Image (spheres, grey):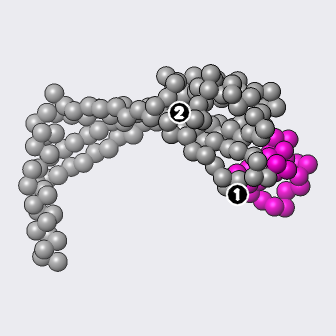
Amino acid sequence: MLPRGTSDTPSPFESFDQARAAAESIAPFKTTVAQLKAMGFDKEEGKNVTLIPYPDVLARLAPYSGVPMDELDPGIRECIKAKTACRAWLFHFERQDRHREGGFVGDFLNVKRVTKTTGWSFEALVVANDGIVLFRNWGGQPNSDRLDRQINPLGPLQPAGESAGALLR
């Protein structure tokens, strides 16, 4: 009888491992931008996709100007040479499940609420120029696990007590 919920960021992937495998299948200098959609990375109609402007691409991929060009990844070097023709997209996918735990009476009366949140989140950065992927990288949180506890000694009267305290100050 306790509330529960889910939070999904629209994703073609059911798990972190599926998303990781798809990102790893993107081959720099071989995969075309057109092929990305079939791999689950739809830059046009996909949800939660960020188009990263060129100055931010530089800040992300080559944040230190003291690093020699020949030490950078070949795809990053090509992007820097292409300047504003270089495009980058950040794809974000996640799934979270929230479940309330504990007793019904304490939760219902707002005395004690315990919410357990589990899930995963994934981000993939894809950089391209002239329709060819130059660089890809991924990261995220394969297993998130969070427990939120809220204890209100006054139960349903807690908000009134907080309002009264603010008036007294």
Q: Nearer the viewer, residue 139 or 88?
A: 88
**Residue occupying image coordinates x 50% and y 36%:** 47
**Residue occupying image coordinates x 17% and y 71%:** 166
**Residue occupying image coordinates x 75% and y 34%:** 131
> In the rendered image, which quarter is residue 65 located in?
bottom right
Q: Secondary structure at mark 1?
A: helix
Main SS type for the magenta part?
Answer: helix
The three-letter amino acid code for the residue at tag 1 is Pro
Q: Is residue 37 visible?
A: yes
Give, as a single range, the part of the protein colored magenta. 57-82
Residue for badge 2: 46
Residue 80, labelled with which disc? none
**Residue 75 falls within the magenta-colored stretch:** yes
Upstream in the sequence, badge 1 or badge 2? 2
| Relative horizontal placement of residue 140, taking residue 67 as reference (left or right) | left
The x and y percentages for residue 130 are: 78, 38
The three-letter amino acid code for the residue at tag 2 is Gly
Number of marks in picture: 2
Q: Secondary structure at mark 2?
A: loop
Relative to 82, is 17 above or below?
A: above
Q: CA distance from mark 1 to mark 2?
A: 23 Å
**Residue 1 falls within the magenta-colored stretch:** no
Quarter of the image with the N terminus in it: top left
The x and y percentages for residue 62 are: 77, 53
Residue for badge 1: 55
**Residue occupying image coordinates x 13% and y 56%:** 158
Relative to 98, is 79 above or below?
A: below
